[in-house]
Structures are given as C-alpha cells and as structure tokens.
Amino acid sequence: MELDTKQKVLIAIYTEYQKDIPDMASITSSNLGIDHDIFKIALDKLDNEGLVNGLNILKGGYRSIPKQVIIHHAKMSSYGINYVETKLNIQPSLSNKEKVKVVIDRSTEWGWEQLKDIGSKVLSEVIKSHAGI
C-alpha cells in the first residue's frame, strides 16, 4: 500500500493520539522526513477535510502554503479515527497499545522508518503509563 503525505501525517497524529497524554508538538516535518511546506499543506488539508481538529493555521500573503501551523492542540476527529482504522484494518475495540503495534507492523511493511520510530516511542510510553512507571 502506498501512502500520500497527508495520510502519513494523519497516521502519525493517530499514533501519538493513542498515548494517555499525547504530545502533538512532537509530530514535525523533520521527524516524518517530509518537506516543511508540504507538511503544512497536509495539515491544512486534514483540517479542511475534518480528519483532525484543534490545529491553529495562520494564512496570509499570496501563497497557498500556510505561513504557520500550530499542531500542539490537535486531536483526531471521530471521522479521522475511523479513516485510519479502516485504512490500516485496525479493529476499533483494540487497546491503544495494540493499535500502536498494528501501526508499527504496517510501517515496517511499507519501509517507512520514521513512523516505525514514532510508533516505537509511543508504544514505550503507553506501556510505561499502564505499568505505572
């Protein structure tokens, strides 16, 4: 399966969203290996399509590229969650830990190392929070 940039960004947000206390600011263009302008456009599209809520998008000037996108308060919409879970064949009833494992497995299949790294970090934090560490 091939993913476009918008889908990659959405899956990264979905993965971070699985933590008890998500840190959406950790989702950056450099962490995902994506050009910064393309990353901002992808976030703008996700907001426009109702897949993600809580983005602060600053537009202006003559370019279609947002001047700035603040992702700190981003949250997955129910539509966005359903989209990712359908796309990746994730059962909604799985625990957050199990969902992250599926994302890691899929990213390994696709050869997308950046998402695999993000997923592994999130999984580690989810396990720690459930263990009370």
Image (cartoon, rainbow, N blue to C red):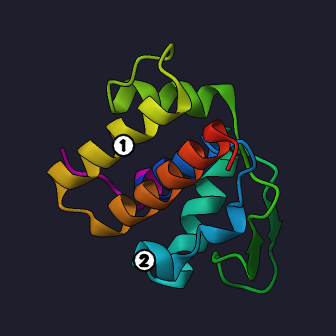
Looking at the image, can residue 10 be seen?
A: no
Is residue 3 on the magenta stretch?
Answer: yes
Residue of label 2: 34
Q: Quadrant of the N terminus?
A: top left
Q: Amino acid at mark 2?
A: Ile
Q: Residue at x 71, y 60 (%)?
A: 23
Q: How many marks?
A: 2
Q: Which residues are magenta?
A: 1-7
Q: Nearer the viewer, residue 39 or 93?
A: 93
Is residue 43 on the magenta stretch?
Answer: no
Q: Amino acid at mark 1?
A: Val
**Residue 125 at x, y = what percent?**
58, 53
Residue of label 1: 103
Looking at the image, can residue 121 be seen?
A: yes
Q: CA distance from mark 1 to mark 2?
A: 19 Å
**Residue 130 at x, y = what percent?**
63, 37
Callout 1: SS: helix
Q: Are marks 1 and 2 in contact (CB under 8 Å)?
A: no
